[in-house]
């Protein structure tokens, strides 16, 4: 059966890949984006109903993070609009080990819609499409929490899982935790990148306050600086969040992508050969 699916965040890291996969499967896909027609903007709840019109399923990626103030209200408004629009099912992308995000998960679970929650560990692609790319290009990755062991997950694996559970109702009501197959410290991850790319890239351990100071100096908004402080301290600082999950393998019937495999596939794209922008 072919569905009408709204992919919110459909221009972002996981959303773009989910759009590609669903389109290949010949579902009717609408990209939820501020640049879309109609536009979808988390900051303007009046955009929700027009974007949901005619849809029967949706993938929900909240930006910047379900832990930020305002997220609960936005998720409530979205699920209410989804019920009104007659959607059958939604899949919510959440963060593994984010207590604040769990409040948003509960809103989705209690909305009356069928749902699947996908809780993700930190993405590999933060080093190639996200906030750490410029550090890699500069050859100096200065990040806090040197002791944290992180089960980084590949967004291609998340997209495969999301695509499957969006159209397969046997996952209704389930929470799926997606991680990679191994735990790595930042230093170990940077070493794999440096060896793969064939360039010297140094990991420099710094404090969370130093990292936040750097973000402030770069002119990033206070809310963003707070969010990174929260993610480093609460998510990476909690040993429970350093556990590996085997849900990718259970859902997809194949092993999750390793950081080494991620590095190799991204070398081919040339992303790490760009000029430094910091
Ligand atoms: N990065 C990680 O390691 C990680 C780990 C676990 C969970 N997550 C979760 O993944 C989600 C996405 O995070 P990300 O940083 O990787 O972002 P992302 O998916 O790469 O990209 C951001 C997306 O959000 C959209 N967006 C930005 N502001 C918006 C607004 N006001 N209204 C509507 N759409 C907006 C952008 O669309 P347009 O610009 O086209 O409007 C774009 O599609 C977050 O909920 C985060 O908690 C991330």
Image (cartoon, rainbow, N blue to C red):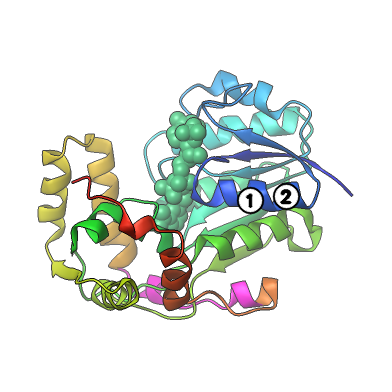
Q: Is residue 81 above or below residue 75?
A: above
Write down the quadrant of residue 251 in the picture.
bottom right
Q: Nearer the viewer, residue 234 or 65?
A: 65
Relative to 166, is 245 on the left or the right?
A: left
Q: Residue at x 76, y 34 (%)?
A: 55
Is 18 colored magenta in this rendering? no
Residue 98 visible in the snapshot: no
Q: Are dots 2 and 1 in contact, CB under 8 Å?
A: yes
The residue that disc 1 covers is 18
Q: Residue at x 74, y 58 (%)?
A: 172
- Residue 143 is situated, as x and y percent measured from the top left of the image, at 20, 62
Query: CB at mark 2 closer than 8 A to ligand 1?
Result: no
The residue that disc 2 covers is 22
- Residue 117 is situated, as x and y percent measured from the top left of the image, at 61, 56
Q: Is residue 175 above or below residue 69?
A: below
- Residue 210 is situated, as x and y percent measured from the top left of the image, at 10, 54
């Amino acid at each position: 059966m072919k569905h009408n699916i709204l992919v919110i965040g459909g221009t972002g890291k996981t959303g773009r890949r989910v759009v590609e996969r669903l389109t290949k499967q010949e579902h009717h896909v609408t990209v939820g984006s501020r640049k879309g027609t109609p536009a979808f903007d988390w900051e303007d709840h009046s955009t929700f109903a027009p974007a949901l019109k005619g849809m029967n399923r949706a993938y929900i990626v909240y930006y910047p993070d379900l832990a930020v103030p305002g997220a609960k209200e936005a998720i409530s408004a979205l699920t209410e609009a989804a019920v009104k629009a007659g959607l059958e099912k939604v899949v919510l992308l959440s963060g593994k080990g984010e207590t604040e995000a769990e409040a948003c998960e509960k809103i989705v679970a209690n909305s009356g819609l069928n749902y699947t929650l996908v809780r993700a560990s930190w993405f590999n692609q933060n080093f190639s499409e996200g906030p750490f790319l410029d550090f890699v290009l500069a050859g100096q990755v200065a990040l806090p929490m040197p002791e944290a062991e992180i089960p980084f997950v590949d967004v291609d694996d998340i997209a495969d899982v999301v695509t499957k559970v969006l159209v397969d109702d046997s996952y209704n009501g389930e929470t799926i935790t997606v991680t990679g197959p191994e735990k790595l410290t930042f230093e170990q991850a940077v070493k794999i990148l440096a060896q793969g790319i064939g360039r010297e890239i140094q990991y420099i351990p710094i404090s969370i306050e130093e990292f936040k100071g750097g973000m402030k100096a770069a002119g990033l908004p206070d809310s963003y600086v707070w969010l990174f402080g929260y993610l480093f301290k609460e998510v990476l600082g909690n040993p429970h969040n350093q556990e590996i999950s085997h849900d990718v393998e259970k859902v997809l019937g194949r092993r999750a992508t390793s950081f080494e495999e991620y590095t190799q596939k991204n070398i081919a794209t040339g992303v790490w050969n760009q000029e430094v922008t910091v």
